[in-house]
Image: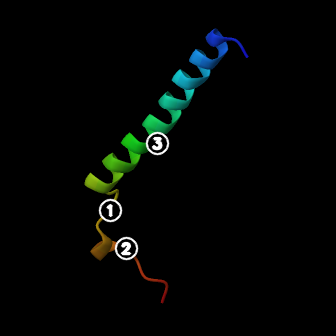
Amino acid sequence: MNSTAVTIMVIAMLAIWGGLVLSSIHLMKNPDIDMDKVPSDD
């Protein structure tokens, strides 16, 4: 692979993994529902 392909691959990988990390952090700080309000499977 030439240097242009490697550069584009690295940028794409950083965008994907960075988005995953940022979305995980956001979800931990702002959960969808409180764990106290999760319905049980009784």
Q: Nearer the viewer, residue 26 or 31?
A: 26
**Distance between mark 2 and mark 3 Cα atoms:** 24 Å
Residue 22 in sight here: yes
Q: Residue at x 43, y 35 (%)?
A: 18
Q: Earlier in the sequence, mark 1 or mark 2?
A: 1
Q: Residue at x 61, y 23 (%)?
A: 9
Q: Nearer the viewer, residue 32 or 2?
A: 2
**Residue at the extreme bottom:** 42
Where residue 4 appears, as percent x and y from the top left, is: 63, 9
Q: Earlier in the sequence, mark 3 or mark 1?
A: 3
Residue 30 in sight here: no
Q: Tell me the element at label 1.
A: loop
Where residue 40 appears, as percent x and y from the top left, is: 43, 82
**Distance between mark 3 and mark 1 Cα atoms:** 20 Å
Q: Earlier in the sequence, mark 2 or mark 3?
A: 3
Q: Residue at x 28, y 67 (%)?
A: 34
Which is closer to the viewer, label 3 or label 1? 3
Give the residue pinned by disc 1.
33
Label at residue 38: 2
| Left or right of 32 on screen, residue 5 | right
3 relative to 39, above or below: above
Label at residue 20: 3
Q: Tell me the element at label 3.
A: helix
Where residue 24 appears, as percent x and y from the top left, is: 39, 49
24 relative to 37, above or below: above
Residues under numbered marks 1 and 2 in contact, where contact means CB atoms less than 8 Å apart: yes
Q: Nearer the viewer, residue 35 or 23?
A: 23
Where residue 37 appears, as percent x and y from the top left, is: 31, 73
Q: Tag 3: residue type?
A: Leu
Q: Quadrant of residue 1?
A: top right
